[in-house]
Image: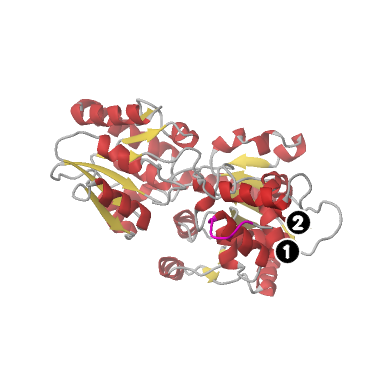
């Protein structure tokens, strides 16, 4: 369960005018259970297999807020189950590109309101092509876990020059040349602290580069430990992969709130969040990124100025109070609507929703190669299989998570079509006949 959801619920728990309850389709982690219990918010875990329980709680609610991305269990719930009459908002936790972290026309059609976590999503082609009536039901609220928690945090003294990274270490998020970029940073006494759940590939790349003495991996840490590490950074070195799935990065917000100057690539999300030369530095190339790191190492005055301005921006934009007020406006607007049953928009005749067809629905117009492999019309099945193998080599399709066919296979292992697509995209199956 995400920090944004939990901190929002904790924030609203003292509001007598609202009563919240939480349903998690999968397991709730210990942190979520502790926080929810301490705030006396009603909650239920592993609800995916409890359809009647979900329906019962939806019937009781004045408003239903679904935290949405192309997760297998979320997509399965929406596609295969008719929801009882409700007022429903979907809050997107993806930016809309690249696939499989994409929007679809049907996803916009389904709820009463669709809410982006970043204005960046207004530029997504799927939104741009929507009919005017549907666009009127879409809005944006910056997603935040609340930078107020960091009001008393600030950089602390430490040895050397420490460049830090916090976040997902999967190459769907981190720059594929991350290790090479670190090698290019030629600064005396430089050290790199990498905070996040370890991936074997990244660790092996660091060891092979001969940089193991300069790169420290912490693995997964608690929120408190994460902030302690953050306060010992001199810079927040955050080179992410081009076209990654992020929307309104929480760790980037936190770094700015503490006053750790971020240096980022000019990907859409970072360019939208960081004001170049005001709250950080935005590089147009790896070479420029390395130059900016060196500039900030040499120019402590510039670093102090950007630190102050980054902190001001963070507390102005990424306030939990501001996000909460925005949601109250959405809830007030929804309360003016009549409750209606929700069912997945159909195209033509009724279908049997096997898990692989649910996966295709999650992709919308991006499902072409999978559809061709399932029911060849324009190319042979052999050609489609080769195209799937090629697609599987791309970082956004190779992850075991992040809405890929591999993640769908984990949740629906009995589906032989999903299993075949997963094997093909991993390159672990002989060519289809």
Q: Nearer the viewer, residue 312 or 421?
A: 421
Range of the magenta residues?
426-431
User: Is the residue 304 above or below the residue 344 in the image?
Assistant: above
**Disc marking residue 344:** 2
Label 1 secondary element: helix
* Image quadrant assignment for residue 294: top left
Residue beneath label 1, please? 80
- Where in the figure is residue 24, as x and y percent of width and height? 56, 66
Residue farthest to the right, as pictured: 349
Residue 149 seen from this side: yes
Report the front residue among 385 and 331: 385
On whether residue 429 falls in the magenta region, the answer is yes
CB atoms at circles 2 and 1 under 8 Å apart?
yes
Residue 427, placed above or below residue 190: below
* Mark 2–mark 1 distance (CA, rounded to whole Å): 8 Å
Q: Position of residue 357 (x, y in %)?
A: 72, 59
């Amino acid at each position: 369960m995400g920090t944004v959801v939990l901190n929002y619920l904790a924030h609203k728990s003292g509001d007598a005018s609202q009563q919240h309850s939480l349903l998690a389709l999968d397991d709730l982690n210990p942190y979520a259970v502790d926080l929810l219990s301490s705030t006396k918010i009603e909650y239920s875990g592993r609800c995916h297999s409890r359809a009647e329980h979900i329906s019962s709680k939806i019937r009781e609610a004045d408003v239903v807020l679904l935290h949405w991305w192309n997760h297998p269990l979320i997509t399965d719930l929406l596609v295969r189950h008719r929801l009882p009459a409700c007022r429903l908002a979907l809050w997107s936790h993806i930016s809309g590109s690249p696939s499989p972290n994409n929007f679809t026309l049907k996803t916009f059609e389904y709820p009463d309101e669709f809410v982006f976590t970043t204005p960046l999503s207004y530029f997504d082609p799927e939104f741009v092509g929507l009919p005017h009536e549907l666009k009127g039901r879409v809005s944006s609220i910056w997603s935040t876990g609340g930078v107020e928690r960091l009001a008393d945090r600030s950089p602390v003294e430490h040895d050397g020059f420490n460049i830090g990274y916090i976040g997902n270490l999967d190459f769907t998020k981190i720059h594929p040349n991350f290790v090479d970029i670190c090698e290019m940073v030629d600064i005396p006494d430089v050290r790199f602290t990498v905070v996040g759940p370890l991936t074997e590939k990244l660790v092996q790349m660091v060891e092979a580069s001969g940089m193991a003495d300069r790169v420290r991996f912490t693995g997964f840490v608690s929120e408190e430990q994460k902030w302690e590490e953050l306060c010992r950074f001199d810079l927040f070195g955050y080179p992410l992969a081009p076209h990654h799935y992020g929307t309104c990065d929480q760790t980037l917000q936190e770094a700015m709130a503490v006053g750790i100057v971020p240096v980022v690539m000019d990907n859409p999300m970072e360019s939208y969040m960081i004001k170049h030369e005001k709250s950080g530095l935005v590089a147009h190339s790896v070479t420029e990124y390395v130059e900016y790191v060196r500039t900030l190492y040499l120019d402590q005055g510039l670093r102090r100025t950007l630190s102050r301005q980054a902190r001001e921006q963070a507390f102005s934009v990424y306030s939990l109070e501001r996000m909460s007020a925005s949601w109250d406006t959405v809830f007030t607007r929804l309360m003016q609507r009549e409750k209606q049953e929700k069912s997945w928009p159909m195209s033509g005749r009724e279908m049997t929703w096997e898990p692989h067809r649910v996966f295709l629905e999650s992709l919308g117009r991006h499902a072409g190669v999978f559809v061709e492999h399932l029911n060849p019309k324009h190319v042979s099945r052999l050609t489609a299989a080769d195209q799937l193998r090629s697609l599987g080599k791309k970082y956004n399709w190779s992850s075991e998570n992040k809405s890929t066919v591999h993640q769908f296979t984990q949740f629906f292992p009995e589906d032989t079509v999903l299993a075949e697509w997963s094997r093909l995209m991993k390159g672990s199956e002989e060519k289809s006949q």
